[in-house]
Image (cartoon, coloured by chain):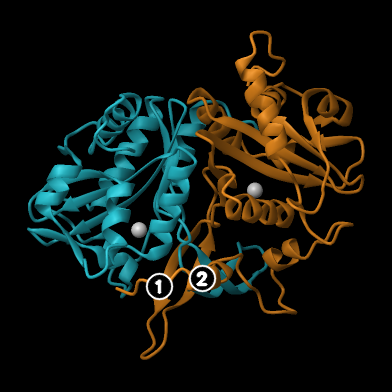
Chain colours: A orange, B cyan
Amino acid sequence: MVKYPNGTFAAFRKSVGEPTFKKNQKSNYYRKNINFSDRGMTLEQMINESNKFYRLKEIAVVHKKPTPIQIVKVDYPKRSRAVIKEAYFRQESTTDYNGVYNGYYLDFEAKETKNKTSFPLKNFHEHQIVHLTECLKQKGICFTIIGFTSLNRYFVTPANVIAKAWWTQNKSSVTLTEIEEWSVEIKSGFQPTLPYLEAVDYFIADRKSKNGKYKI
Amino acid sequence: MVKYPNGTFAAFRKSVGEPTFKKNQKSNYYRKNINFSDRGMTLEQMINESNKFYRLKEIAVVHKKPTPIQIVKVDYPKRSRAVIKEAYFRQESTTDYNGVYNGYYLDFEAKETKNKTSFPLKNFHEHQIVHLTECLKQKGICFTIIGFTSLNRYFVTPANVIAKAWWTQNKSSVTLTEIEEWSVEIKSGFQPTLPYLEAVDYFIADRKSKNGKYKI
Ligand SMILES: [Mg+2]
Ligand SMILES: [Mg+2]
């Protein structure tokens, strides 16, 4: 077993980032990753950067879950690493992010829209709503980060607000006004890029207070 | 947006299980999954079954993280779903399992050995040890489930015990005696298959007590 000196772990950290893609490749995944917002980063990239910052500062440990893949065929070339030759994207059964912050379990989904006045609920899948509700029952801090990329505005919205809207018949979107009313807005910055834990602190205080607004 | 009636969610649940593999296929992953222990299940299968039970009973929400894959080439055939044509296994940056149990963040790695007297530490990677230690600092309940498959014995061992052994120079394994001393042994059963939350309850009580043994 190789027990690396501390120095090499930073190098290791670098190697475990997001998947890399060949340029000029026609892949939805690739396109999604370079769908740059005004700030030059997608919401997902902003959150990943923030999580890196929070982890290195020992403030919180939050990771993005890998995309679930169904592997069908793998080649094992001699003197070379295994190559997956046939695989399919699978339905995700949970949200994109979870982790731990000062004893609290965090679970959230990040979504962005180019709309300027409302967020379409079709961006959520039922299993994500169900998963967030399951985690809420276990006293997790569950929320969504909604990015209005055209407005450069970011909201941390409690999961129960989204779940309630999602289960409302004939409601296909949440208006920006509703989101403003029921979320904590956060400003994108430098370190961290998206300080969503400020909203989490707010939710934790709200939970502790007798007449909290969010019932989170 | 399709809002499924409750009934179909059970069906959805079934479809989001472990990846399936073609039979007679030479894949380490396949072999790993059919490496049946005496009970006809691998440790991972036992834990997945237990997690399903805990989730359906609303006792805890714990999921296995998907295997991280680096996707290089994807085909988008007309009238058919996307096919990944070239991809590679990536180094995992976290442990296999995490989730939430009554407000507590759980994080653990499951490992099995055919050895009868000790558990080889080379089964752990540095990043797993580092991740568990990071989560411990955030007050998560962090542990490993070690299965001695030849003995049909299962131990829930606090992460700090494993981390301490791992960082000890020239220590290449933890003896069964040490594991017996510093773990909670759990018996495999029917529902859940592996009741590891009994050990978690023990750790939580230990944490609350002034002179706890585990310092978890
Ligand atoms: Mg997502
Ligand atoms: Mg593992």
Q: Who is closer to the viewer here, A136 or B86?
A: A136
Q: Could you tell me residue B119's position as x and y percent? A: 18, 59
Image spot of residue B30 (x, y percent): 31, 65
Q: Is residue B125 visible?
A: yes
Q: Residue furthest front?
A: B211
Q: Within 10 Å of the Cα at label 2, are there few (<14), some (14-19), or many (20+) other Cα atoms?
A: some
The three-letter amino acid code for the residue at tag 1 is: Tyr
| 1 and 2 marks in contact (CB < 8 Å) | yes
Judging by the rendered image, the residue that carries numbered circle 2 is A12
Residue A4 is labelled as 1
Q: Chain of mark 1?
A: A
Observer-nearest residue: B178 or B66? B178
Among numbered discs 1 and 2, the one appearing first in the sequence: 1
- Secondary structure under tag 2 reads helix
Three-letter residue code for mark 2: Phe
User: Left or right: B124 with respect to A190?
Assistant: left
| The N terminus of chain B, quarter of image | top right
Image check: B93 left or right of B215?
right
Q: Which residue is at the front of the view, B110 or B144?
A: B144
- Residue A104: x %, y % from top left: 53, 33
